[in-house]
Image (spheres, grey):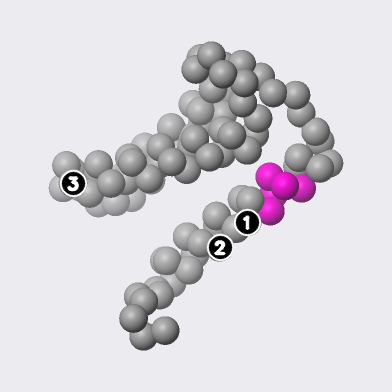
Amino acid sequence: MAWMAWTWPTAIFFMVIAALLITFTVLAIRYPETPRTGVLGIETTRGDRLFITLLGSAFINLAWLGLAGAAQWWALAVCLVYAAAVFRWV
């Protein structure tokens, strides 16, 4: 596939996403949970919170690229804080 820019960072990104999905599937099978209501006022499960985290992290990174001149590693730090907040309070 010469038309696609597959680099190691891109491959690692997709491997991490795949590992997260596999891990959350195993957790859901092994330790079923009941949905909980957080600050959004909707019932969410682990998978819902993972989706909200991934979606929000995508927007954080896009905003970082467009607005900040600093290295993208700082956006990763912001995303980790955001993920911790989502899994704690949503």
- Numbered badge on residue 19: 1
Q: Is residue 77 visible?
A: no
* In this picture, residue 20 sits left or right of residue 63: right
User: In the drawing, does residue 62 fall left or right of residue 15?
Assistant: left
Numbered mark located on residue 83 in the image: none
Task: Find numbered disc 1 in the image and state the secondary structure of the residue it sits on.
Answer: helix
Q: Position of residue 32 (x, y in %)?
A: 80, 33
Residues 85 and 33: in front is: 33
Which span is picked out in magenta? 22-26
Q: Position of residue 3 (x, y in %)?
A: 34, 81
Q: Residues within 10 Å of mark 3 (few under 14, many from 20)?
A: few
48 relative to 25, above or below: above
- Quarter of the rendering containing residue 67: top left
Cα separation between marks 1 and 2: 6 Å
Relative image position of residue 84 (x, y in whole percent): 51, 31
Upstream in sequence: badge 1 or badge 3:
1
Q: Residue at x 75, y 42 (%)?
A: 27
Tags 1 and 3 touching, CB below 8 Å? no
23 is within the stretch colored magenta? yes
In the image, 31 versus 72, the foreground residue is 31
Helix, strand or loop at mark 3: helix
User: Which amino acid is tagged 3?
Assistant: Gly
Which residue is under mark 2? 15
Mark 3 or 2, nearer chain start: 2
Q: Quick one: SS at disc 2? A: helix
| Amino acid of disc 2 | Met
Mark 3 — residue? 66
